[in-house]
Each structure stands twice: as C-alpha cells, then as structure tokens.
C-alpha cells in the first residue's frame, strides 16, 4: 500500500489535511445517480482501492442514491482510517423518480446532517457543504439562514468544518461572517472558467476549491487542442484536463468519480502529469 497522497496534500484550517486528488463517489449509485449500483461488489472495490492508492478525501452526499452511496462507503471503509476525510453535502433531496429537489429549511438541513451521520456511521461530519445551486449557476441570494443552521450544528459538535457548493463570491463573503469556510465546490473546468476570480480568491485565503464536473462532458472539452496536447504528452485527454486543474491553483482539489477500478487508476495517474508551459498555453485557448 502506498502512503503517498496523489497530487500531494493540502492543509486547511485547524490542520485539516487531505490529498489534493480525491474521489467523487456520486457515480457509484445507479443510472442518474439514483438507486443501487449495477455492480455492488465493484463499487466496494473502487472505494477500497481509492484508499489503498493514497486518497484521503472522498466526496459524497446522502442524496446520491439516495442513501445508497453513503451506505456503500460505510460498508467498504468503516471503521475509517484516521487520515480519511469524508466531505458531504446537504441542501437537496430526491423525489420518487430521481428528480433533484432543493430542501434548505433549517429543520430539514438539520435532519439531513443527522441522516448523513447515520448512513456514514459517524459521530461528526468532517466537512459539510451547503448545496446552494446546481451546475446551472450560482446567484447572490442570501444564505445566512441556511449557513447559520449548519454553523449551529458545528457548534454542537456534529460538523467539524463547513463549505459551500454552487456558491457565488458574494455568498462566500456572507458565509464567512457566520463561520469559517474551508472549501468551495463549484462547476469549473477547461471550458467553464467563469469562476476564475473565485479560484484565485480561494487560493489567497487557503480555501480548497473543488471543481465538480472536472472533465466537463461537453463537446468543446473534446476539442482538437486538448486531444493534440494529450497525444504530445502520451496521456489521455481526461488526464490532461485533470492535470490542468491541479496546476491551475495551489488549493485546487479534485474529486473525479468513477465506478471502474481501471478508470480510478487512470484518474489518479493524472496527479503525476506535469504540463509544460507550451501545453498550458495551448490549453488556455480552449473555452475562450
């Protein structure tokens, strides 16, 4: 077993330290992030292999499944290694068809925290992110009531650290007047760079920035430029896209997801891919 954290480690407030290359557990659920996995044994294998390969940062939520992914994490990894940090999210629920329903009333946020604790088998959540917006985009609406609810639960000892998901710069500022923020999780990748300024702010303030959908899935990301750079470096386009994110900022942390052990290893290998200056310059033209 390796003890080297892929991509190195990032230390945040109160000595919270985890691997910059993490694992996003969302894809361990069934199609549409709904229901059980097609191959339960393989899902458990992927989780165990991620930890064996040095990952100490797993991103999840009770609304993946719902409940399914957190229960898989508990089955695969509990009792958890002392250096493993599980980051979860609250602020939404699923309907009977798998639809995503915002749910941010204080009473339900509290219930969601307790449900995450139960399904993960924890006494306290390492990090709880408030899910404000989905990938459609953030707003500047006040989050004082919602984030204040999580801050109260932090004071009660049910959460150790707080973060935001789908947040604007304004909302980050507001949240920081209520409680410390250790991570921001927003849509960001080679072709979606509207949060450039927020990425830089997080680096300045030593806040982890976790881009979701780091591989995009959009046609421009499969552009000839990306393919050409990958060919030049002997890597896959996906590895180049991940390596670019790691080099973009010292506080960027990655949470690519997969249900395949081979794909997991490919993602982790991206942490060792150093992009030369000319490749970075070529990639800078994507999405402009």
Image (cartoon, rainbow, N blue to C red):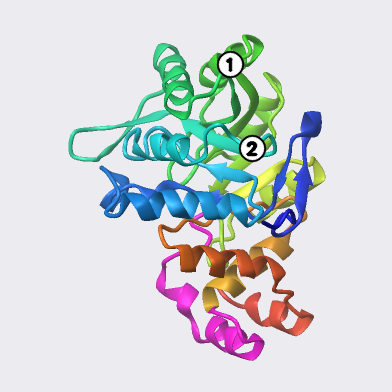
Which circle marks residue 31 in the picture?
A: none
Q: Which residue is mark 2?
A: 81
The stretch in magenta equals 212-236
| Structural crowding at the residue carrying mark 1, measured as other residues with C-alpha within 10 Å and reported as few (<14), some (14–19) or many (≥20) | many
Q: How far is mark 2 from mark 1, CA to CA?
A: 19 Å
In the drawing, does residue 282 fall left or right of residue 221? right
In the drawing, does residue 138 fall left or right of residue 284? left
For mark 2, give the secondary structure. Answer: loop
Does residue 255 appear in this view?
no
Which circle marks residue 158 in the picture?
A: 1
Does residue 207 appear in this view?
yes
Identify the image quadrant of residue 202: top right
Q: Residue at x 75, y 84 (%)?
A: 278
Residue 218 pos. (x, y %) = 41, 68
Q: Residue at x 49, y 25 (%)?
A: 121
Q: Give the mark nearer the N terminus: 2 vs 1.
A: 2
Q: Is residue 235 above or below residue 31?
A: below
In this orientation, which residue lies closer to the viewer: 45 or 68?
45
Quarter holding the N terminus is bottom right
Q: Residue at x 41, y 11 (%)?
A: 107
In this orientation, which residue lies closer to the viewer: 178 or 80?
80
Question: Quick check: is 229 in the magenta stretch?
Answer: yes
Quarter holding the C terminus is bottom right
């Amino acid at each position: 077993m390796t003890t080297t954290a892929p991509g190195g480690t990032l230390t945040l407030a109160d000595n919270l330290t985890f691997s910059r290359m993490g694992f996003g557990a969302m894809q361990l659920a069934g199609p549409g992030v709904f229901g059980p996995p097609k191959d339960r044994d393989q899902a458990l294998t992927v989780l165990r292999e991620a930890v064996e390969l040095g990952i100490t940062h797993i991103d999840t939520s009770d609304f993946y499944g719902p409940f399914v992914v957190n229960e898989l994490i508990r089955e695969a990894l509990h009792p958890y290694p002392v250096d493993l940090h599980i980051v979860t999210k609250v602020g939404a629920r699923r309907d009977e068809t798998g639809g995503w329903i915002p749910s941010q009333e204080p009473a339900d946020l509290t219930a969601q925290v307790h449900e995450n604790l139960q399904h993960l088998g924890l006494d306290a959540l390492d990090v709880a992110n408030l899910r404000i917006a989905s990938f459609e985009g953030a707003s500047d609406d006040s989050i004082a009531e919602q984030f204040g609810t999580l801050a109260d639960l932090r004071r009660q000892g049910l959460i150790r650290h707080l973060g935001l998901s789908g947040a604007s710069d304004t909302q980050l500022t507001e949240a920081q007047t209520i409680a410390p923020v250790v991570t921001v999780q927003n849509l960001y990748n080679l072709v979606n760079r509207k949060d450039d300024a927020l990425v830089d702010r997080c680096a300045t303030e030593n806040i982890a920035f976790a881009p979701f959908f780091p591989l995009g899935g959009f046609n421009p990301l499969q552009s000839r430029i990306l393919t050409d750079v990958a060919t030049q470096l002997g890597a896959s386009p996906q590895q180049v896209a991940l390596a670019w994110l790691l080099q973009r900022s010292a506080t960027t942390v990655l949470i690519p997801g997969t249900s395949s052990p081979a794909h997991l290893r490919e993602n982790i290998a991206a942490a060792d891919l150093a992009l030369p200056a000319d490749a970075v310059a070529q990639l800078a033209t994507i999405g402009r």
